[in-house]
Image (cartoon, rainbow, N blue to C red):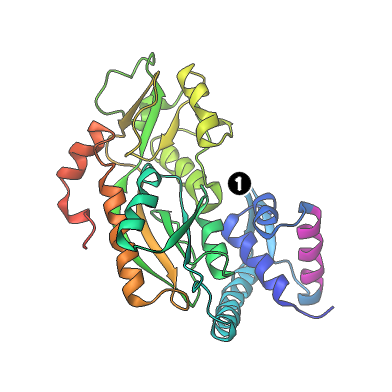
């Protein structure tokens, strides 16, 4: 069996997601198919590339070297394909993706103001990794990405990026009837007995970041539920679990959203785009539209509004 590009994409997906299940979902394959390809590749190489860990799979020392070289090869391949591909986007449609943050409610209108006459197609996706993949494959022209500190997402040419918000804290959502709901700020250690709802975009590192933060606070989180953003609300309302949330979301009825003391988790927002699809002028206008959309929602949560006004250094530069 010869080494193929699909094998390189498979091992990179395994390394970036840390999970056969999530790698399979990203690649549009079954779990057995991913496992079979990995075994074939390891047979070709003659050594083990990935081993099972407590949280999924992780590369061996050799596996890490192979992944590093695979990323270089894939970057060149994607750049070549981008250079050869006939430019698209001239049909007037801007194919934009966004992580699930509060400002999606304003993105369509604000981008329309920034780019008059340009029709917008919007894909809302909790996973930054999947958005980055869609960008690299040319399924999107641009995207607003949320990146957890310490868990970077690989962007390959011709995709480039510009930071929108360099740093913001992650908040926690609780039932309004929770014993800690009346506090203005909550210590992570006070949530050691709680059941947790897995954060969205686990393949971006959000779940790993949650576990790391809780361990630093002296406990292992009991992650009992995995639900999309909307599906998690009833669990929070009824007090069955707590979850990490974007700080600009208004608290749904029956819940409260509070900052975590010491900001144990922070993230940043990044605008990424394909430079073979968007001109510098169009990218700048899109950036302004996204910045305006984000600013529209900083007052959605009073606690975040106070934090935002106290940190002018993180405001978008437009």
**Residue at the outermost right position:** 1
Asked whether 231 or 20 is in front, the reply is 231
In this image, 285 relative to 29: left or right? left
The percent coordinates of residue 156 (x first, y second) are 50, 73
* Relative to 58, residue 171 above or below: above
Secondary structure of residue under mark 1: loop
* Relative to 92, residue 174 above or below: above
The percent coordinates of residue 247 (x first, y second) are 33, 39
Quarter of the rendering containing residue 283: bottom left
Measuring 27% from the left and 39% from the top, which residue is drawn there? Answer: 262
- The quarter in which the N terminus is drawn is bottom right
Circle 1: is it few (<14), some (14-19), or many (20+) Cα within 10 Å? Answer: few
Measuring 47% from the left and 75% from the top, which residue is drawn there? Answer: 277
In this image, 185 relative to 255: left or right? left
Asked whether 108 or 165 is in front, the reply is 108
In this image, 284 relative to 62: left or right? left
In this image, 33 relative to 156: left or right? right
Q: Can you identify the residue that label 1 sits on? A: 55
The percent coordinates of residue 242 (x first, y second) are 45, 27
Quarter of the rendering containing residue 102: top left
Asked whether 151 or 316 is in front, the reply is 316
Measuring 82% from the left and 61% from the top, which residue is drawn there? Answer: 36
36 inside magenta stretch = yes
Please report the bounds of the magenta region as a residue range.
Answer: 32-43
Total marks shown come to 1
């Amino acid at each position: 069996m010869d080494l193929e590009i699909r094998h390189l994409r498979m091992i990179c997906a395994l390394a970036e997601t840390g999970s056969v299940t999530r790698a399979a979902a990203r690649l549009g394959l079954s779990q057995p198919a991913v496992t079979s390809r990995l075994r074939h590749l390891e047979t070709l190489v003659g050594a083990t590339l990935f081993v099972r860990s407590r949280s999924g799979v992780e590369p061996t020392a050799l596996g890490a070297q192979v992944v590093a070289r695979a990323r270089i090869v894939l970057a060149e391949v994607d750049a070549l394909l981008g250079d050869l591909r006939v430019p698209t986007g001239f049909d007037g449609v801007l194919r934009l993706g966004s992580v699930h943050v509060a400002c999606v409610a304003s993105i369509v209108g604000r981008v329309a103001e920034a780019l008059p006459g340009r029709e917008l197609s919007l894909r809302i996706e909790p996973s930054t990794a999947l958005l980055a993949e869609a960008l690299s494959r040319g399924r999107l022209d641009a995207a607003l990405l949320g990146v957890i500190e310490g868990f970077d997402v690989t962007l390959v040419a011709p995709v480039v990026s510009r930071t929108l918000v360099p740093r913001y804290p992650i908040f926690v959502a609780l039932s309004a009837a929770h014993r800690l709901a009346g506090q203005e700020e909550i210590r992570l250690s006070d949530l050691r007995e709680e059941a947790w709802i897995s954060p969205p975009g686990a393949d971006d590192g959000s779940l790993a970041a949650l576990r790391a933060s809780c361990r630093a606070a002296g406990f292992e989180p009991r992650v009992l539920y995995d639900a999309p953003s909307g599906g998690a609300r009833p669990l929070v309302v009824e007090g069955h679990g707590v979850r990490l949330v974007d700080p600009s979301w208004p608290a749904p009825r029956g819940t409260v959203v509070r900052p975590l003391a010491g900001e144990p988790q922070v993230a940043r927002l990044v605008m990424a785009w394909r430079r073979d699809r968007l001109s510098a002028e169009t990218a700048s206008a899109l950036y302004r539209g996204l910045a305006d959309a984000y600013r529209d929602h900083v007052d959605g949560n009073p606690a975040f509004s106070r934090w935002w006004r106290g940190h002018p250094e993180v405001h978008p530069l437009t």
